Image: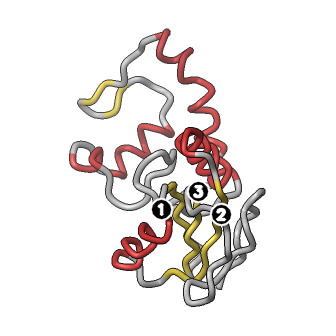
Amino acid sequence: MQKQPSLTGFCESFAPTSVWPAIESYCGLYVLHFANGDAYAGLSVDFRRRYLDHRETWPDIVAISFRVVDREALRREERRLIRELEKQGVPLRNSSLTTIVRGHSPLDDLVPPSRQKAWLRNQSNEIGELRRPADPAAIRRNGRALARFRRLPAQE
């Protein structure tokens, strides 16, 4: 099993087949750890039930980390957790809230991935017949997000 990410405030990771920790609530954030080093971060008001759904999708879960979070803070804390895991370079299986898309994305149906990469490398506004919008307000608004994206480890 790969080294697990650093998770502040989470219970010590436990194996799915072990006795689950006795906690007052299973409403909170969780991270599923996979044998290949991938992870999945999520939220649930009833993690025990949600975990059973995940086992149907991913039989290769090797460990779980959990943190109790108030229901009102779940979405905000989930976004924060995903950003932190991405900063640590953890490959995530999440399909939403991530800045790094792994595998097929809807954009791939419109623009082949090789052209997307060329477009990102190319600072011009054009790639083939496609034109990147030159909207100064959008560039100002998204400049920091683009800079953060470019600093992330390359994901193929």
Give whichever of 15, 136 is nearer the camera.
Answer: 15
Q: Position of residue 101 (x, y in %)?
A: 44, 52
The residue at which mark 2 appears reads as 24
Q: Quadrant of residue 15?
A: bottom right
**Alpha-carbon distance for marks 3 and 1?**
10 Å
Percent coordinates x, y for residue 35 in the rendering: 57, 83
**Residue placed most toward the observer, 95 or 22:** 22
Measuring from the top left, give residue 65's x and y in whole percent: 65, 69
Question: What's under tag 1, amino acid-wise?
Answer: Asp
Identity of the residue drawn at 56% across and 63% down: 26
**Which of labels 3 and 1 is toward the front?**
1
Element on which disc 3 rests: strand
Q: Amino acid at mark 3?
A: Leu
Separation of residues labelled 2 and 1 (CA atoms) = 12 Å
User: Could you tell me which residue is drawn at 47 percent across and 62 percent down?
Assistant: 46
Q: Which mark is residue 46?
A: 1
Query: Can you tell which of label 2 and label 1 is closer to the viewer?
Result: 2
Q: Nearer the viewer, residue 86 or 27?
A: 27
Looking at the image, tell me whether mark 3 or mark 1 is earlier in sequence order.
3
Packing grade of label 2 (10 A; few <14, some 14-19, many >=20) is few
